[in-house]
Amino acid sequence: MSKKIKIILAEDEPALAQIIKESLETRNFEVIHCKDGEEAIEVFKNEKIELLVLDVMMPKKDGFSVAKDIRKLDNKTPIIFLTAKSQTQDVVDGFNFGGNDYLKKPFSMEELIVRIHSLLGRKTAIKNEDSIVIGNYIFNLTKQTLQYLDTTISLTHREAILLNLISENKNKIVERSLILNKIWGEDDFFNGRSMDVFITKLRKKLSLDSNIQIINVRGQGCKLIC
């Protein structure tokens, strides 16, 4: 059996941290979860860590500050930032503080795996899955499921296609006509009412995370906020 890759995951959202930790542990990683930046630094000092995954916004010490302190101790161990921020300057700051890569939420777990192995100089096998982190859920388009901690929620084919479309455009308005033509095949009154029903169903299935919203933008379309 191959040696496990020991990494630090510093993420202050417990549910999201558990999802990421469990996903990584199925891929031969040993994951030490730290709830804040100060804990991450202490663990790094006492463990032989091969890579750090740092959330940018954390209590006590943010991810950038942790990276800065880590680089005073070690300038080789790879660092990946996880963040909801999307400003160019934030990306630049991350690299200036010693980061090696930058992944914006929501992200595919497979993409995180690939980036980790790329930084470690290892090859990785990609499973034939399409998993995306949406808030504290893992959405799998292929399996048509939403995973929230130990709860698996099944989606219909149309629910999965609809969620995939709006999650690809997170925090952006997706035009109503685009959704109807792409998923229902025609923009008419009856399909519009059907779409509204499906959006209501998705809201209910995503309700375990209060930070997720699907809002209607009058006269334009809908928007997934998380």
Image (cartoon, helix red, strand yellow):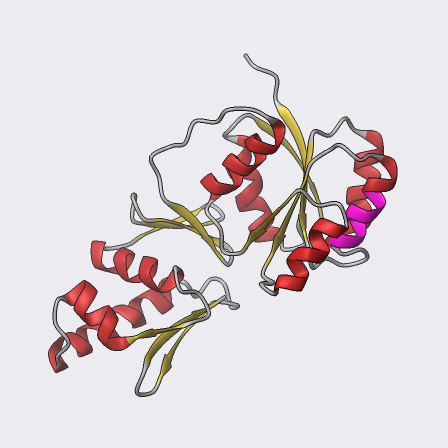
Q: Which residue lies at the image location 73% right of the left edge and 30% below the top edge?
A: 49
Left or right, 110 with respect to 83, comes to: left
Location of residue 112 with respect to 93 vertically, above or below: above
Q: Quadrant of residue 43?
A: top right
Query: Total number of numbered labels?
Result: 0
In the current view of this chain or complex, which residue is farthest to the bottom?
219
Left or right, 62 with respect to 17, comes to: right
Q: Which residue lies at the image location 68% right of the left edge and 56% below the top edge?
A: 92
In the current view of this chain or complex, which residue is farthest to the right?
72
Q: Which residue lies at the image location 81% right of the left edge and 57% below the top edge?
A: 60
Q: Picture coordinates of residue 126 (x, y %)?
A: 41, 31
101 and 212: which is toward the camera: 101
Specify the quadrant that holds the N terminus.
top right
Q: Could one spot residue 182 in this view of the protein?
A: yes
177 and 137: which is toward the camera: 177
From which residue to which does the magenta span run?
64-70
90 and 13: which is toward the camera: 90
Left or right, 65 with respect to 200, comes to: right
Q: Could one spot residue 197 in this view of the protein?
A: no
Q: Picture coordinates of residue 170 (x, y %)?
A: 44, 65
Location of residue 21 with respect to 147 vertically, above or below: above
Q: Which residue lies at the image location 82% right of the left edge and 48% below the top edge?
A: 68
Location of residue 57 with respect to 98 vertically, above or below: below
Location of residue 159 with respect to 187 vertically, above or below: above
